Amino acid sequence: MHQADAKAFSAERIRQLVSGIPFFNEVRHRDLAQFEALLGQCELWVAGPGDTVIQRGQDEPFLYFLLRGQLVVTGHSGVTAEVLNYISPGEVFGALAMLRGTPRSATVRVDDSTREAVLARLDYAPFQDLQQRGRFDLQTRLAFYSMLVHNIRWTLEVYRMSDPQHEVAAAMRKLPLYSGPRGTEQELLALHEQAHALADLLCQWHQVPLRATPQHL
C-alpha cells in the first residue's frame, strides 16, 4: 500500500471518489470550505491485490473510508487466514480502535480479486479534543460524531436482533439518547460520550473477535 500520487488523482477525481461517503457529502453540501478542509486532513492511499491495509495489533489513530475496491477482514496477520468479513466501497472502518486508543483487533487486506483499492485515511486528532477549535467548525464535528454513533449503533442493533437476551443488549437499552437542543456544543458532548459508550459496549459483546465487522477494527 502506498500514498496516492497527486498527479494521478486530481482534485476533481478525489471529490468524485469521496462522493460515495455520506459524511463527506453532508459536509460538502453544507460548507464547501469545510469540505476542502476535510479533504486536506485526509490522506489518499492506493493498494493492490493482497496488500495489507491494517495489521492486527497495530496502534494508530486513523479512521478509514473505502472509496474503491474490496477488502477482506481476517482474524490474524496471515494472508491465508480465515475470512471473517468483507468491506465494500462506501464503508467506514477502524472506529473502535480509534475511539478507545487500543490496537487493531484484526487484519485488513485487499481482496485478491480487486485490481486496485483506493482509501481515504482521516486523522482523529482534530476531532478528539472537543475544546479544540481548529480547522473544523461545530457542524462538521457534529457530523463526524453522528457518523460514528450511527455506524456503531447499527452494528450493535444487528447483534441485538440475533441475540436479544444478551447482557449487552440490555445495556444498550439503558444508554440515554440525546434530546436537548440541536446543533450545539451540548449535542457534540452527548454524541462524543455516546460514541465512546457504544464502542465500549461493542467490545463487551462476546462475539466481537469472531464477527470482526469494520467498526471493530
Image (cartoon, helix red, strand yellow):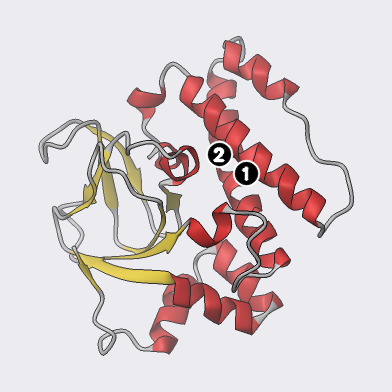
Q: Label 1 vs label 2: CA separation?
A: 5 Å
Residue under circle 2? 152
- Where residue 7 sits in the image (x, y, percent)? 26, 90
Question: What's under tag 1, amino acid-wise?
Answer: Val
Name the residue: 45% across, 53% down: 91
Residue under circle 1? 149
Tell which of 133 and 92 is nearer to you: 133
- Where residue 212 sits in the image (x, y, percent)? 36, 33
Q: Is residue 107 left or right of residue 20?
A: left
Q: In the figure, residue 97 lies in which quadrant? A: top left
Tell which of 105 and 173 is nearer to you: 105
Q: Is residue 198 left or right of residue 42?
A: right
Tell which of 85 and 52 is nearer to you: 52
Q: Residues within 10 Å of mark 1 (few under 14, many from 20)?
A: many
Dot 2 falls on a residue whose secondary structure is helix
Question: What's under tag 2, amino acid-wise?
Answer: Ile
Q: In the figure, residue 59 lies in which quadrant? A: top left
Name the residue: 57% across, 11% down: 166
The reply to whether callout 1 and callout 2 are in contact (CB within 8 Å) is: yes
The N terminus lies in which quarter of the figure? bottom left
Looking at the image, the residue that sits furthest to the front is: 131
